[in-house]
Structures are given as structure tokens and as C-alpha cells.
Image: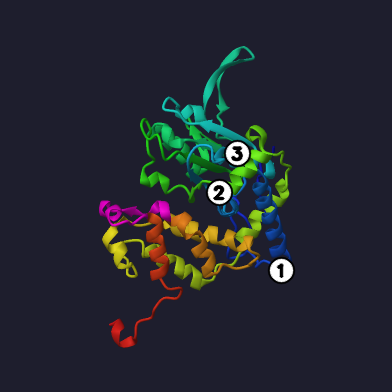
Amino acid sequence: MSELINTNDPHHADGTADQASAPLLTPEEVAEAQGMTTRILEGLETAILGQRELLEMVVICLLARGHMLLEGLPGLGKTELVKALARLLGLSFQRIQFTPDLLPTDIIGAPILEEHEGSRRLVFHRGPIFANLVLADEINRATPKTQAALLEAMQERRATVLGESHALPTPFFVLATQNPIELEGTYPLPEAQVDRFTFKLNVPNVSTETLQEIISTRRHGRPPDLEEVCSAAELDRLFAYVDRVHLPQAVANYIARLVTATHPEGEEAPQEVRQFVKYGASPRAAIALAETARAAAVSVGKPNVGFDEVRRVAHCVLGHRLILDYSARLDGWTPRRMVDRLLQAVPDVARELPEDLKA
């Protein structure tokens, strides 16, 4: 297993590129990036059957170096998906089973008193969060204090214990799962903390044909053995390619207007948003839209972001960030339906008012 450290210019310590100085992608680089993305996706399809759309979104979020929240019934392969990602990419992997008695130190680690050369001293022992890919299983079963410790590490990409800061490995991804049933004894994530996740993905049930294939080819539910398809150097290069995908100003403006329209007071907010949305998306949503749209462009072999890429990732980025009023459910409005309405209402290009009306 490898921990990737990206120190090459023009990229920052967290692996992001300086857009002002990064050159545009060449056709050869675009083809290489798409090829690597396709290999990762095909490897995941070997492990997880019948979930093509879900896997595409997972790969896009991964390329954007974002965190994911997976929601679905037990037994749909959420845990196996994360294990498959780690094997295909050669990343270090840790699984944390969240329970009500889990403590923050069980995740981050803690200083332990050790004897060394006749003296005693506190030595920090790293917790399971110090891995490239961390599976936070059933995150809503842990107490808010423990949830906050994980989410803080996700945001800061470092852990601080007794005043000493410890950097997390690069890249660092958290894939958290939560079960929509058995809500007794759980601690639902507050809306402000759900905002830390780049994507929220619903894991759907599989079709009858997929179930038949699973029971015919997967004895005892065992997945096939997977080989690494992307080396540490290749993955580092792939991240650099995503950072260099061009985001035109027209598309950036569309993203900004789309996020603004999620707020009831927004200029382009449709009537349904004004009536049913209590709180709209944060600036973090706009950043997530831009970065994941870049990754979506790479996945289809494009060197620049188009409006279609923004629309492709909009549900995964905005759905969990819209807080609907209680009356919305009574009228049949869900976050997904509201995002559909936003995409319908906000035009690609801003409508310019006639000069005599601007005053």
C-alpha cells in the first residue's frame, strides 16, 4: 500500500493546481487521463455489479479529491465498493465501524506513555484515520462528538492532539455510509456537517438480472480478486490533469447563478425555491460543482468544462445541501425534484436586462 505525496510544481501541498500558471491539457494528456479513468471504472464494475451510474459518480468524486456519503440499505455493496477502490488504486485502507461508544481517540489516535532508555514519555499512536482511504461505516451511529472529530479531520486534512499537529496522508478520502432504516439509537448528521461531504450518493437496489448474476458467479458473496490498475505515480498525474481542466468564465458564472438560485432570496430563484426551500447551498457547494465538473469532463475525454458536466454532478452536490421547509414534503417536493427544478429554471447564460430597465 502506498501513501501519495504530491510535491511537484505548479501544485500546492494539498495537490491542487495553481490555475493561473497551469497549462491547458494537450490531446495526448486528455486521452491518457480518460484511459486511466476508464480502467478504474472497469475495475469497479468487475467488483460491483449492476451499479454503473453510481460507480461513475464515485470515480468523479474521487478524481476531484472529495469525500462521499453513501446512503442505502444493508447488503448493497457499500463496504465492498470502498475495498475495491483501495485495491485498484493501491491505497492504504482502514475501516471504522461507528458505534455509540466510539470515542474521538478511537479514530484519531492518542498519546501513550512509553518507557524509552530509562525515561517515560508520551508517544502519539496514530488511529485508523491515518490512511489514504477511510471507510466510516454507519457514521450516524456515533455520538456528535465523535462525528465532529472525523469531520474536522476531513476539512483540515490533519489531526491535532495535545497541541501537536499531524498531517494526514495524501491523497485522503473519507467514504461514509449511513443506513436509512433502524433510526432508533442513531445520531443524524447535522446539516452543517453533511455539507462537508462533496457528494451524497444513494445506493439503489439492483435489478433481477444483476441478482441472478451475483448468485450464479459469486459463491458466498465473495468478490473477484482485483489487481492494481493505477500506480501511485499515475494517480498523482491523473489528479494533476484534473486540476488543469479549463473552467470557462461562462460556466463559472452558471455555477455561481445556480448556487445563488438555491436561496429563497436569490435573484434567479424559481417560485418553488422561494416557497419550499428554507436554506440554500453554501459556497462550498459552488466549489464542489466546479471541481467535480472538471473530473466529469476528464472522464468523457474533454479538456474543458461544459454546462453538461455541471448538470451531470448537480444532484450529487446540491441534493444534500438544500434544506426544505416542512411543507415541501406535504406537497411532494424532495431535494432531487428541487434540483431538477433549479436546472430547468436557471439558464446556461445569464439573461441581460434591457438598458432602459437596468435603472
Dot label at residue 27? 1
Query: Mark 2 or 1 closer to N-term?
Result: 1
Residue with the most extreme bottom position: 356
Neighbour tally class for label 2: few under 14, some 14-19, many 20 plus, Cα within 10 Å: few
Q: Give the image's coloring scheme.
A: rainbow
**Residue shown at the point (65%, 49%) measured from the top left:** 45
Label tally? 3
Query: Mark 3 or 1 closer to N-term?
Result: 1
**Residue shown at the point (63%, 35%) measured from the top left:** 221
Dot label at residue 80? 3
26 horizontally vs 164: left or right: right
Horizontal and vertical percent for residue 275?
Answer: 26, 61
Tell me whether the residue at label 2 lies in contact with that at label 3, contact meaning CB atoms closer than 8 angstroms.
Answer: no
Question: Which range is magenta?
Answer: 319-334
Horizontal and vertical percent for residue 324?
Answer: 31, 54
Neighbour tally class for label 1: few under 14, some 14-19, many 20 plus, Cα within 10 Å: few
In this orientation, does residue 264 appear?
no
Q: CA distance from mark 3 to mark 1?
A: 35 Å
